[in-house]
């Protein structure tokens, strides 16, 4: 029954990927109907709020699903959400077997879908390509379990671990820039600090691959940016969200009003001397529907995310250059030395470039990030921590996971 199941599930994952950048914050799901060894139908979740993959697949089967096996990378839903429960559609269509990769972390569904199907006499097999499926839907898992967006920090470093101090445009290789553009298209938003916007005026668009431009989130606790600096053109409609402090809004009322008139969404938070509480910022971004962010700017922003234990994924492009000066990836101008009692994230991040042996030395548990949620042991999704080091050509040099995942030739999300 499960012979060849991996191949069919791999197809599901690839079908699911067709929804990348369109279904967020919901999961990417693909489904395949198989009779004997023959694929009779396929489907995927096309867009947020739309038909679920299972039902899309049944529709394409034109009634020929009776007695078939359904492969799907996520447990079928059993709840009434924006669409009716998929379990009922599968039961009604006469599906005999269901093979799933992973249970749905959504508490409304988790375990209930499987129970409902088994209760109706359908044989359910679980766990085929589970690790790959969890990696594919890492944004969704974090979003639904931690009530915050998935945070992916991307940096470009010299061999001596500096992200500044050289030519800031030194990742010139087309493949690596393409990869970053693909990430931009997959994440809901790109996040940068105000300093990066002032220094680099980045466009943060997707130009080298097909895909939509991500929304832009700017952290600007002191409200240094005006409407002009917050103009981020794009081919698709993009939200510009500026996170600042309540005091700054009071102090620079006219600027805040001009930003709002220019269509910038202003979110004001309590702060300590202009430094925002990033837990609050992420919680609010979650509330406004942002499921994942790619952090693209500012050692200071990286440092604060790292100190708060909020980094899920860290990608570093290492260029063959020695800067000899400049900031490390997690070093803010204010704190040139590692934070007192520095966080584990910071140790790992600095260890990564200053002591390249770090990963091999502690290879058994290479990515042991600590975060409030994972420290309490409550949250499995937060434990899906990933570090990838690329060369400037965009080739993977090292990929380390907190848990040991079996990765095959499937390069999901890269
Ligand atoms: C999807 N697409 O293919 C599957 C999902 O609000 P709804 O009705 O779209 O339900 C969303 C939930 O349904 C989602 O959080 C997940 O738990 C479950 N499965 N969702 O968007 C799909 N199979
Ligand atoms: Zn469903």
Image (cartoon, rainbow, N blue to C red):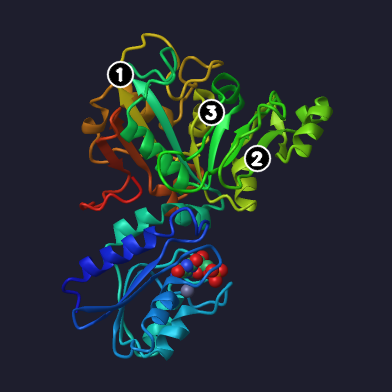
Q: Quadrant of the N terminus?
A: bottom left
Pointer 2: what residue? 241
Residue occupying the point 53% across, 69% down = 50
Q: Quadrant of residue 215?
A: top right
Is disc 1 surrounded by few (<14), some (14 to 19) or many (20+) residues within 10 Å? some
Q: Nearer the viewer, mark 2 or mark 1?
A: 2
Where does residue 343 sit, x and y in percent of width and height? 45, 30
Q: Quadrant of the C terminus?
A: top left
Where does residue 249 sit, x and y in percent of width and height? 78, 31
Cβ atoms at labels 2 and 3 below 8 Å apart: no
Where does residue 99 sit, x and y in percent of width and height? 30, 75
Mark 2, secondary structure of its residue: strand
Counting residues from the start of the chain, the first of labels 2 and 1 encountered is: 1
In the image: residue 269, left or right of residue 143 = right
Give above or below for 240 relative to 156.
below
Give above or below for 15 relative to 344.
below
Pointer 1: what residue? 159
Q: Is residue 176 visible?
A: yes
In the image: residue 160, left or right of residue 293 = left
Give above or below for 226 relative to 101.
above
- Between residues 202 and 224, which one lies in front from this camera angle? 202
């Amino acid at each position: 029954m499960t012979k060849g199941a991996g191949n069919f599930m791999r197809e599901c994952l690839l079908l699911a990927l067709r929804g990348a950048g369109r279904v967020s914050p919901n999961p990417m799901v693909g489904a395949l109907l198989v009779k004997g060894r023959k694929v009779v139908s396929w489907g995927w979740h096309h867009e947020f709020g739309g038909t679920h993959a299972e039902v899309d697949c049944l529709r394409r089967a034109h009634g020929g699903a009776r007695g078939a096996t359904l492969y799907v990378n996520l447990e079928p839903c059993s709840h009434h959400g924006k669409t009716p429960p998929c379990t009922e559609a599968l039961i009604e269509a006469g599906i005999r077997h269901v093979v799933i990769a992973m249970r749905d972390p959504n508490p409304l569904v988790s375990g209930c879908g499987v129970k409902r199907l088994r209760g109706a006499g359908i044989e359910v097999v679980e766990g085929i390509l589970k690790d790959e499926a969890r990696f594919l839907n890492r944004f969704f898992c974090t979003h639904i379990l931690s009530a915050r967006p998935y945070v992916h920090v991307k940096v470009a470093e010299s061999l001596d671990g500096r992200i500044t101090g050289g030519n800031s445009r030194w990742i010139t290789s087309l493949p690596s820039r393409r990869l970053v553009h693909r990430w931009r298209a997959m994440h809901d938003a790109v996040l940068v600090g105000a300093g990066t916007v002032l220094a680099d005026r980045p466009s943060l668009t997707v130009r080298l691959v097909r895909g939509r431009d991500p929304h832009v989130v700017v952290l600007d606790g002191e409200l240094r940016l005006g409407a002009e600096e917050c103009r981020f053109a794009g081919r698709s409609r993009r939200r510009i969200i500026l996170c600042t402090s309540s005091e700054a809004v009071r102090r620079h009322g006219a600027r805040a009003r001009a930003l709002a008139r220019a269509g910038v969404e202003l979110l004001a938070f309590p702060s300590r001397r202009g430094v925002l509480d990033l837990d609050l910022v992420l919680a609010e971004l979650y509330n406004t529907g942002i499921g994942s962010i790619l952090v693209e700017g500012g050692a200071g922003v990286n440092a604060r995310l790292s100190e708060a234990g909020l980094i899920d994924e860290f990608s570093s492009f290492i260029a063959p250059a020695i800067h000899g000066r400049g900031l490390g990836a997690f070093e803010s101008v204010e704190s040139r030395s590692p934070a007192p009692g520095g966080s584990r994230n910071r140790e790992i991040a600095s260890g990564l470039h200053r002591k390249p042996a770090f990963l091999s030395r502690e290879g058994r548990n290479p990515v042991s990030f600590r975060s409030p949620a994972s420290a309490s042991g409550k949250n499995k999704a937060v434990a899906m921590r990933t570090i990838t080091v690329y060369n400037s050509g965009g080739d993977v040099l090292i990929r380390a996971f907190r848990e040991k995942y079996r990765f095959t030739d499937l390069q999901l999300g890269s």
